[in-house]
Amino acid sequence: MKLTTKGHYSVKALLDLSLQQKNRPSSTKVIASRQNIPAPYLEKLLIEMRRAGLVKSIRGKDGGYQLAREPVKISLGEILEAVGETIEPLPHHRAYPQASVDWVTFSLWHRLSQKLKEALYSITLADLYYDARSWQASLGEEASFVV
């Protein structure tokens, strides 16, 4: 599995939203600026994540995006899946029963893939939130957070 820019930016954006006090909405422009993400690209990702039920959009002067659920109820797997990331490695690889070495390799990668998928769905945005807050605290209160 390879984490593409799309997946990386999506996780960064939702982590940014989880770091906002009282789940206040943030505009695309503000998130993009804080996380150094191109705003038009981020807008497309946020629309995909809204459709998946991960964020909701708030209209108006103080509007923007906010998490649709608590960070503990949003997994990395859901975020990646929402923006079309594939979690399955070697999608076109087939094992040949006559070649036991090939079958063993295929079996190994399949098992590793399952473990990776389990891990991605067990790590939540809350886990990353606490990691980020610990990192911020180690740098001092004035540190700004960029994923």
Image (cartoon, rainbow, N blue to C red):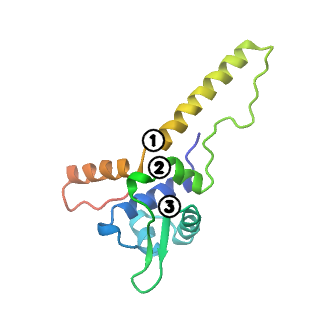
Q: Nearer the viewer, residue 33 or 95?
A: 95
What residue sits 62% from the left and 27% below the top? 109
| Amino acid marked by disc 1 | Ser
Q: CA distance from mark 2 to mark 1?
A: 6 Å
Q: Locate the C terminus by quadrant.
A: bottom left
The reply to whether dot 2 and dot 1 touch (C-beta < 8 Å) is: yes
Which of the marked residues, 2 or 3, is nearer the chain's N terminus? 3
| Amino acid marked by disc 2 | Ser
Q: Mark 2 = which residue?
A: 75
Which of the marked residues, 3 or 1, is nearer the chain's N terminus? 3
Q: Is residue 15 above or below residue 64?
A: above
The reply to whether dot 2 and dot 3 touch (C-beta < 8 Å) is: no
Q: Nearer the viewer, residue 140 or 114?
A: 114
Q: In this rendering, would 140 be left or right of 57?
A: left
Q: Residue furthest bottom?
A: 61
Q: CA distance from mark 2 to mark 3?
A: 10 Å
Give the crowd class for mark 1: few <14, some 14-19, many >=20 residues within 10 Å: some
Q: Is residue 27 above or below residue 87?
A: below
Q: Position of residue 3 (x, y in %)?
A: 55, 46
Q: Which mark is residue 122?
A: 1
Q: Is residue 13 above or below residue 124?
A: below
Q: Mark 3 = which residue?
A: 54
- Helix, strand or loop status at disc 1: helix
